Image: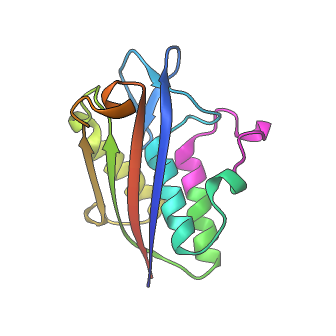
Amino acid sequence: MRIGIGYDVHRLAADRALILGGVKIPHTLGLLGHSDADVLCHALMDALLGAAALPDIGRLFPDNDPKYAGADSLQLLGQVVDMLHREGWQVGNVDAVIMAERPKLAPHIEQMRKNIAGVLGLEIGAVGLKATTTEKLGFVGQEEGIAAQAVVLLN
């Protein structure tokens, strides 16, 4: 077994969609990035890759490569899962937290879990996901960005 941890952050910006766990969430701001900037999927990908001692997403899906411009991060997560399977790894479970002051994410958590479980080939019960604020502290609390952290188990 192997355990991995991942972390990602993206700046909030006007004229961008807010996509988390493959769910488009209504909000006045979205996340800025080369791809769809889905911090949850990015943190999960880095946790999975780290557990398998594979290169991180910055090396696999560089932000200077035009083919990843606007990329769907759930699809990139699927590519990571394919890499893991080729290396002989299976995902056991994942647990993640999204840190955002606004919008309220609770109404979207179950759909995010379903999306992630589907891509990872897991039962929904093997996908833990929480959302929290930072009580108005730091860049998340000042609504400058959104962060996510993930822990995974590979078998």
Vertical arrangement, residue 78 with respect to residue 82, above or below:
above
Residue under the image location 27 percent in, 43 percent down = 109
Tally the marks: 0
Protein image colouring: rainbow
| Percent coordinates x, y for residue 133 in the rendering | 24, 36
The quadrant in which residue 117 appears is bottom left
Q: Which quarter of the image is occupied by the N terminus?
A: bottom left
Vertical arrangement, residue 64 with respect to residue 7, above or below:
above
Residue under the image location 24 percent in, 41 percent down = 132
| Percent coordinates x, y for residue 21 in the rendering | 41, 44
Instruction: Depth check: give the residue in front, 28 or 138.
Output: 138
Residue under the image location 55 percent in, 68 percent down = 50
Instruction: Depth check: give the residue in front, 21 or 37.
Output: 37
Is 13 displayed left or right of 20 in the figure?
right
Residue under the image location 78 percent in, 41 percent down = 65
Instruction: Depth check: give the residue in front, 21 or 99.
Output: 99
Is 81 displayed left or right of 22 in the figure?
right
Residue 62 covered by magenta stretch: yes
The quadrant in which residue 122 appears is bottom left
Is 131 displayed left or right of 144 in the figure?
left
The residue range painted magenta reads 61-77
The quadrant in which residue 24 appears is top left
Q: Which quarter of the image is occupied by the C terminus?
A: bottom left
- Residue occupying the far front of the picture: 138
| Percent coordinates x, y for residue 113 in the rendering | 32, 51
Residue 70 covered by magenta stretch: yes
Vertical arrangement, residue 95 with respect to residue 143, above or below:
below
